[in-house]
């Protein structure tokens, strides 16, 4: 026999040699034809057409195995200089030795081990695909021109290159492995293990990568990475590169390019370097903004720390309860700073840390502003200019801060920072900013004046009653009983969906109406959604406001029905009793209390109410976890 040989039907061949030096130069396998252990040498071709199959072939230098549409090849070994072309058929479990080549032009290759090269490509209409490929030391998997791969494993010394409309999903990059995405190539769901590297080059795009401890995602100029998750390792966004929606559960992000919507969890760190921009961060770990770096519209959550280093810029920042922004000397904040909730901290390293025109909003009870450039000694003084501009000076250095809202001197407290002796400023009125519904809308409680008509809730619906007096009672922390005097914080949504509408702070014995009961705030404390503030969260002095109406009634504070003041304790203890006496005389007619049962302790809470509040606490905790 010489030339071509065709096997069909039930015909088969075992251990045939094919090549220019042999009788058969081409072995053709058609429907039902099969070959086992074929040796394809230089000048030889094994063609597997529809219905044909080949198993265990060896393709050496100059040899070609062609797997056409409908044909199948399994366990082919491709030696240096040998080629397997998959043109519409299927190849299973091929071994590509160093210098060998598997070309998947159409059809599918599965389970290939590559020490040489595998090319997965197409023409946009009929495209090649490969799954579960292993790229070993010295091996290259090239994915281009609409070729697709899934589940590729890249071992030490192996490389996957995705370019020109190629697409790779579910790649696993092991120690010493490299995945390169560039020139309109794309990858999704890559896992980058310890010692593995994913490089996203110019015009490359990746999504949903996971970077494990010791792994690296490198996003170079022109490259884009979205929704990367770091459980460890590093993400480096170089100049000209961009990343969106990165979640730093652990590990480190370095930003010299542009990032947006990065979430930095506790234990994770972000460094924004010269030329880098971090936009809309959520910081619950640590974020450092270096000289030439910019953090814009960042939100600093509970336990989060953002440090603006010398030459760095922070713009339009939100600081939530338990969050801290530090602006070191030489750093600058511009736009606005919004302090949300209680316990937000702003630390200013120098008098010029705040740009001209910057406004600090939301500064209220429990928040702190630490003035690092001044010492708490006899040389300093402070004053309020027009109620909203605060000036603090020691004669040589002057801080000017614009506060959104109108403050009075008794609403601010200054103390010595125990760490470095600097001046710590806090808002003393726990209810400052707490919104009370009136005929004119929601008004901060401290802005209420006698005669203002406050919305009240009764059996027949809502009405308005004129306020007789706003009592103010200052508490000195060092002399106070925590159980009786420290404020209780009811988180937004702790009572029902949208109730309260914002965090609500009450004295422990202040009652709200729930299920037809007057329940004192101290009885609701559960350590989760309703908590008693700790001493560390409180300034040295703070104040309570009390709204007195013509009758004991329910007013709306942040949407919650809370009781007005009733004189079952002497109002003579209040700071401004003289104001009441001037308005109404020292003696006051008794006001009957609302005919509602009063709950003073947790053990008196009805079981149904206890269960409902526990469910709300769980829902709030679940929502926070989902957002993180």
Image (tube, rainbow, N blue to C red):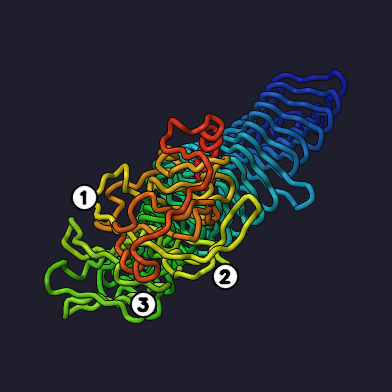
> Upstream in the sequence, badge 2 or badge 1?
2
Expressed as whole percent of the image width and height from the top left, the position of residue 383 reads 26, 77
Which residue, given by chain and number where applicable, does mark 2 sit on? 440
Q: Secondary structure at mark 3?
A: loop
**Residue depicted at x 78% and y 47%:** 126
The circle on residue 387 is 3
Q: Is residue 522 left or right of residue 220?
A: left
Q: Nearer the viewer, residue 416 or 515?
A: 515
**Mark 2–mark 1 distance (CA, rounded to whole Å):** 38 Å
Q: Residues within 10 Å of mark 1 (few under 14, many from 20)?
A: few
The reply to whether discs 3 and 1 touch (Cβ–Cβ < 8 Å) is no
Q: Residues within 10 Å of mark 2 (few under 14, many from 20)?
A: few
Which residue, given by chain and number where applicable, does mark 1 sit on? 479
Q: Is residue 515 left or right of residue 548?
A: right
Q: Nearer the viewer, residue 116 or 277?
A: 277
The reply to whether discs 2 and 1 touch (Cβ–Cβ < 8 Å) is no
Q: Residues within 10 Å of mark 3 (few under 14, many from 20)?
A: some
Q: How many marks?
A: 3
Expressed as whole percent of the image width and height from the top left, the position of residue 400 reads 30, 77
228 w.r.t. 114: above or below: below
Does any portion of residue 552 appear in the rendered image? yes
Q: Residue at the left extreme?
A: 378
> Upstream in the sequence, badge 3 or badge 2?
3
> Upstream in the sequence, badge 3 or badge 1?
3
**Residue depicted at x 64% and y 56%:** 164
Expressed as whole percent of the image width and height from the top left, the position of residue 539 reads 27, 57
Expressed as whole percent of the image width and height from the top left, the position of residue 449 reads 45, 70
**Residue depicted at x 71% and y 21%:** 36
**Residue depicted at x 41% and y 51%:** 506
**Mark 3–mark 1 distance (CA, rounded to whole Å):** 30 Å
């Amino acid at each position: 026999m010489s030339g071509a040989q065709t096997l069909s039907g039930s015909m088969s061949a075992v251990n045939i040699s094919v090549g220019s030096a042999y009788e058969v130069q081409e072995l053709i396998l058609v429907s039902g034809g099969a070959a086992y252990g074929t040796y394809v040498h230089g000048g030889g071709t094994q063609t597997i057409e529809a219905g044909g199959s080949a198993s265990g072939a060896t393709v050496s230098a100059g040899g070609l195995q062609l797997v056409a549409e409908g044909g199948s090849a399994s366990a082919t070994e491709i030696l240096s200089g040998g080629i397997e072309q998959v043109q519409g058929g299927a190849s299973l479990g091929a071994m590509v030795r160093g210098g060998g080549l598997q070309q998947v032009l159409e059809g599918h290759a599965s389970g290939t081990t590559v020490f040489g090269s595998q090319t997965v490509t197409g023409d946009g209409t009929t495209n090649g695909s490969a799954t579960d490929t292993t790229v070993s030391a010295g091996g290259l998997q090239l994915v281009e021109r609409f070729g697709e791969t899934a589940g590729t494993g890249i071992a030490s010394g192996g490389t996957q290159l995705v370019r020109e409309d190629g697409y790779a999903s579910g790649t696993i990059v092991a120690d010493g492995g490299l995945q390169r995405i560039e020139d309109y190539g794309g990858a999704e769901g890559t896992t980058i293990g310890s010692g593995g590297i994913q490089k996203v080059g110019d015009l490359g795009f990746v999504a949903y990568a996971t970077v494990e401890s010791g792994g690296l995602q490198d996003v170079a100029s022109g490259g884009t990475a979205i929704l990367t998750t770091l459980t460890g390792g590093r993400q480096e966004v170089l100049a000209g590169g961009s990343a969106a929606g990165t979640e730093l559960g652990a590990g480190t992000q370095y930003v010299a390019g542009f990032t947006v919507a990065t979430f930095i969890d506790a234990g994770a760190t972000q460094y924004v370097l010269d030329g880098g921009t971090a936009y809309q961060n959520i910081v619950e770990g640590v974020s450092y903004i270096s000289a030439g770096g910019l953090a814009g519209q960042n939100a600093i959550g509970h336990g989060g720390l953002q440090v603006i280093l010398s030459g760095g810029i922070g713009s339009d920042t939100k600081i939530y309860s338990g969050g801290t922004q530090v602006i070191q000397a030489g750093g600058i904040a511009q736009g606005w700073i919004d302090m949300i909730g209680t316990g937000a901290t702003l630390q200013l390293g120098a008098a010029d840390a705040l740009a001209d025109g910057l406004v600090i909003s939301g500064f209220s009870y429990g928040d702190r502003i630490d003035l690092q450039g001044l010492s708490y000694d006899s040389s300093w003084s402070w004053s309020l200019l027009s109620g909203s501009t605060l000036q603090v000076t020691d004669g040589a250095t002057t801080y000017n801060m614009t506060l959104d809202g109108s403050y009075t001197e008794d609403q601010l407290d200054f103390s010595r920072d125990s760490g470095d002796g600097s001046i710590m400023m806090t808002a003393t009125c726990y209810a400052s900013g707490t919104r009370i519904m009136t005929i004119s809308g929601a008004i901060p409680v401290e802005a209420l004046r006698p005669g203002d008509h406050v919305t009240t809730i009764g059996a027949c619906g809502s009405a308005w009653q004129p306020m007789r007096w706003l009592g103010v009672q200052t508490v000195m922390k060092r002399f106070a009983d925590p159980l009786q005097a420290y404020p209780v914080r009811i988180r937004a949504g702790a009572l029902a969906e949208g109730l309260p509408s914002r965090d609500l702070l009450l004295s422990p014995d202040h009652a709200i109406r729930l299920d037809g009961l007057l329940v004192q705030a101290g009885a609701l404390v559960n350590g989760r959604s309703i908590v008693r503030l700790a001493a560390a969260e409180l300034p040295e002095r703070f104040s309570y406001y009390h709204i007195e109406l013509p009758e004991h009634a329910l007013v709306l504070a942040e949407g919650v029905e809370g009781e007005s003041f009733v004189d079952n304790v002497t109002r003579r203890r209040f700071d401004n009793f003289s104001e009441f006496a001037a308005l109404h005389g020292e003696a006051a007619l008794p006001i009957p209390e609302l005919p509602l049962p009063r709950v003073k302790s947790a053990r008196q809470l009805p079981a149904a109410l206890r269960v409902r509040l526990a469910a709300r606490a769980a829902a709030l905790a679940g929502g926070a976890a989902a957002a993180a």
